[in-house]
Image (spheres, grey):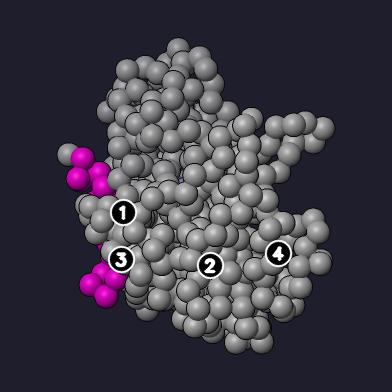
Amino acid sequence: MLTNDALDALFPAHLAVLTETTARALEAAGSDALVIGAGFLQYRFLDDTTHPFVANPHFKLWAPIDNAPGSFLVLRPGYKPQLLFHQPEDYWHKPPVLPTGSWLECFDVQVIRDPAAARRYVPAGAAFVGEPFHGMEGWGFGTVNPDPLMAVLHFARASKTPYELACLRRAAAAGARAHRAAARAFAAGASEYQIHLAYLAASGHTEAGLPYPNIIALNEGAAVLHYTELQSEAPAERRSLLIDAGAQYRGYASDITRTHAAAPGPFADLIAGMDALELKLCEMVRPGVHYPDIHLAAHRLIAELLVTQRIVNCSADAAVATELTGVFFPHGIGHLLGLQVHDIGGHQTATEGGTTPPPAPHRYLRLTRTLTAGTVVTIEPGLYFIDLLLAKARGDARGRDINWQRVGELAPYGGVRIEDDVVATADGAENLTRDAFAALA
Ligand code: GLY
Ligand code: MN
Ligand code: MN
């Protein structure tokens, strides 16, 4: 793992890439300057408390500051980037503090006491990127989130700089550490809520600091893809744990899923089969690969697992052809990962824009692009026993090919998903998640 100084040393080259992309984006929009708003604290309805602040990802891309409501960036080709850091004079709350680090030297920093003070730094006619805000009409922006500019910025986000990859490795490390603590809590008989607390403590995050709400499901709960209930009571019988939980470093996320069986047996075998096929799919991540092909390969491998685990009575070919695999694997194989857990631009056709929808019937697939060096994706095959989908299959021709007795045996375990974060590199796949777990060993 890099030292903090070595990580900071990568930052100027990261900024050089952003500067080049921004110049192209401004050209596409016919603008000379770009202003990026971090966003504002949002108050709850009829209340004086706010939702947790989440900065505009375009802001975080430039400035790794989590707590920056009311701050702005002013970017003009040929000029040092300007960071207008909002630090109110406030004795009710602790005002945001600028993080330290040599990355700050890349910016001309101005502290503003009121967001409105940013207005005088806005170049006339600048493009604005961010959530529109009250009163911005008088600030002289030429355009707000214009499509041609956004298209260039979004398309470029898929491929990460060495600085971003270093941040993602740290996010993977924190996630792996916390997953290990969660697995220990499960083995000790903890409830979903207690596993969640163990995860938070080991990750070093508050709940608001997680990249997405933890999915921690015991037993049948694992059949709910985004299960976030967190029961405080441990069930009488502990059979399985599915935990989908990540961590963040400088705004970059990890997105990791592991499934555990409480004891050896058919469900543990299913996990082992899923783990093996997931690794095969991860190996497919390399430049030039059309991501939907990984999704289709997942259906093929899951069909084979359904056959070897005697969950279906037909052949793997037939399970794919009749879309029977979709009953058990009803989501996409993964997505772009970065500043957002589902990073933007997954369906974008080209830097100029355009949309490539997923191939029918795989409408849930979030990524339809061809991978390039530095693209970071998740690979997350799953196999679940979902009442709703099983009931539908029972009612049509697919039901005849399902081994209902086997489904009955496995349904109390909910389901299995294994999810890793993987970089496409010229040398093949770099599996950030597996590397992070291996480093803990
Ligand atoms: N944690 C959400 C997902 O895996 O996409
Ligand atoms: Mn994911
Ligand atoms: Mn996930």
Asked whether, in this view, residue 330 is left or right of residue 120, the answer is left
Asked whether, in this view, residue 292 is left or right of residue 390, the answer is left
Give the numbered dot on residue 378.
none
Q: Residue at x 33, y 42 (%)?
A: 174
Q: Is residue 12 visible?
A: yes
- Check disc 3 and report the residue beneath it: 10
Q: Is residue 429 magenta?
A: yes
Residue 63 in picture, x, y percent from top left: 48, 59
Toward the top, the furthest residue is 236
Q: Earlier in the sequence, mark 4 or mark 3?
A: 3
Q: Residue at x 74, y 36 (%)?
A: 44
Whether the residue carrying mark 4 lies under 8 Å from ligand 1 is answered with no
- Gap in Å between the C-alphas at discs 1 and 2? 28 Å
Looking at numbered disc 2 in the image, what kind of residue is underneath it?
Gln
Q: Is residue 295 above or below residue 55?
A: below
Residue 98 in picture, x, y percent from top left: 47, 49
Toward the left, the furthest residue is 441
- Check disc 2 and report the residue beneath it: 82
Number of other residues with Cα within 10 Å of mark 4, as a class: few under 14, some 14 to 19, many 20 or more: some
Q: Earlier in the sequence, mark 3 or mark 1?
A: 3
CB-based contact (under 8 Å), mark 4 and mark 1: no
Looking at numbered disc 3 in the image, what kind of residue is underneath it?
Leu
Number of other residues with Cα within 10 Å of mark 1, as a class: few under 14, some 14 to 19, many 20 or more: many
Residue 250 in picture, x, y percent from top left: 42, 52
Looking at numbered disc 1 in the image, what kind of residue is underneath it?
Arg
Which secondary structure, mark 4? helix
- Check disc 4 and report the residue beneath it: 119
- Gap in Å between the C-alphas at discs 2 and 3? 19 Å
User: Looking at the rendering, which quadrant does residue 142 occupy?
Assistant: bottom right
Give the numbered dot on residue 169.
1
Question: Magenta span covers which residues?
Answer: 425-440
